Amino acid sequence: MSVNLRTKYIGNKNNSRKNRPYRKQLDYTLNGKRVRETIKEVTFNTTDTKEVRKQKERLVENIRAKLEIELGNAKNGLVSRQLQKANFILYFEKLGNKKSEKTKTAWDNTLKHLIKFQGKKLTFENISVSWIENFIEYLKSKELANNSIVTYTNKINATLNQAIKEKIIVENPIRFIERPKKKETEIVFLTKDEIQKIISTDFWDNDSKNAFLFSCYSGLRASDIKNLKWSNIKDNRIQLIQNKTKNTVYIPLNNNARNILNKQTHNEEFVFNLSDHISSMNRTVKKLIKLTGIDKKVHFHCARHTFATLLVTAGVNIFTISKLMGHKDIKSTLVYAKVIDEEKQKAVNSMVNLEFYIIELQEVKKKVEYFEDRILHNFETHFSYLVLDDFYGGGHRDRISGEWFYDEYFEQYENDIIELLLKIEHKDEKYYDFQLRLIKLKRIIDTKLSKIENNNDTTNPLRINRKKSFLLNPDLNKKEFINFLYKVLIKNKLIDEKNDDFKFHFENQWDKKIQWLGTEFQITNLIDLLIENNYLNNETKRFRHQLVIHHFINKNGEPFKNNQLSKALSEDKHKAFEYITNDIIDEISTTIPLP
């Protein structure tokens, strides 16, 4: 009896046929009645490549030929047609029940997702290429691990292959899709410091916390630890048959594991009162880890990984570890050795970087100390310095100690300082102190060289203000400046707004303190005065830093940004004086916004 193929177009009927997908229909006569049966397993899409289309045509032809043979024998044909309409869920469940305990969990989990996705009335006829693709997308939407999706897809593939052997279906539609591929699983484990964090963290579920820590010290799987009984613990060791492998393991208890057991009550059969479901145990562990602040994706099985990596790190023989873990194959244990080797390599690499960092830091320290020795201790023998006699600049005198003297090697010092400053400008906070000390030296050179006649070098943008006087502007309004400083302190919450003694105190001390505002040393005096009178709180350094920062310049001749200086200098024995002007006060006001 012949079976013919016809084309049935599907999709939007308003579109032309060439733009619509289609399926093939089996056209045959059975018991005197004409039957047209659509092959739902195969859909021809307009986007199919030539090769895919050929594969689908072969599949359709196989179905047609098989039906034609079956119809030659009515009895066999009817039985086979009934089988194709058989329930796939029941068939899948029947196969899963025949599997070993080791793999049955994966079959059970796949079955749960099949029922959630399709229900219990899924037949072999329903399973097509598009159905498989939709099921994989469903699994991805559940945010399952990639390898879990691979496992579930493999179970369906195995079921369909078995159905082919039993002549229920002709072709496995999974052949025509790109299946997800298995990826190497990242082994997540905890360090000793992270374990200590867990120990120190208060948690509402002590049994779950203690069970997780006990697994870190014993290597037990979640399936074994939730069923661990006091009868499994004898003579300071665990003896039990593993739920997964059915192997008997003997695990000696270390002090940490024994301490945890001592915290558990002995009036119950099980050591830990845990959920029957591992998924629930994992959720509880995630809540615990979140409280600790550990930034890792930790689930209960990570405790077993931790046990293995701690042993490898301690130098325990890999075969001994394999026995303690209950591994059937040493390859399973060697995975942990590989992880530790990678961690060791990272540590070695970081040590190399650290060694270079320390050497570089020491070199910078040595250079800074050399510059300080040469400049701070020797300049006074060659140069004069400016002394301010009275506040409003009624007069000032230059004290001369010998002739004006200039030597090119001082200029070379300056060039070397600038070069080193540029080199360490973007280093971390350990270099901040060296930056500040170099800036001090640079400012001293600026002040000293400003007194040298005929020095017209303007090529270096860092050599600024060398011909200028920095006496405080006599027109500066003392009251306005005190009000300004008062607002700044309030803005930064460094004093109480109701503290009226502030203005009175500074008006009385104006001639002694405010006149010196302008250098690191003088600002420090001002801040110290605030401290002595309890006007500053624990944010003293931050305020001092903000006052000082406008005095410093970077390689572009601009003020340094806040994050480039960590603190103000606490003293300046050599007092490279520069005195503030109204312009500088305006500059401060832009650095520290007023309320």
Image: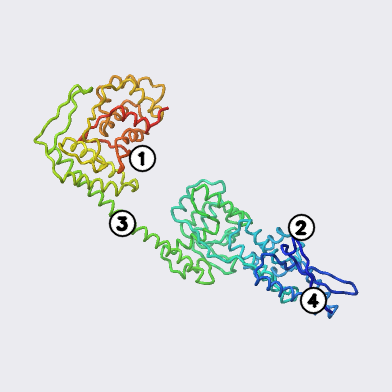
> Which label is found at residue 356?
3
Q: Which residue is mark 4?
A: 67
Left or right side of 397 for 250: right
> Label 3 crowding class (10 Å Cα cut-off): few <14, some 14-19, many 20+?
few
Rounded to the nearest whole Å, what is the CA distance between mark 2 and mark 1? Answer: 67 Å
Above-or-below relation of 115 to 2: above
- So how many labels did they put on this image? 4
What is the quadrant of residue 478 in the picture? Answer: top left
The tag earlier along the polypeptide, 2 or 3, is: 2
The tag earlier along the polypeptide, 4 or 1, is: 4
Tell me residue 397's x, y (percent).
Answer: 15, 27
- Report if residue 101 is visible in the image: no
- Front: mark 2 or 1: 2
Question: Label 1 amino acid?
Answer: Lys
Question: Label 2 amino acid?
Answer: Asn
Rounded to the nearest whole Å, what is the CA distance between mark 4 and mark 1? Answer: 82 Å
Q: Which residue is mark 1?
A: 561
Contact (Cβ within 8 Å) of mark 3 with mark 4: no
Contact (Cβ within 8 Å) of mark 3 with mark 1: no
Q: Which residue is mark 2?
A: 14
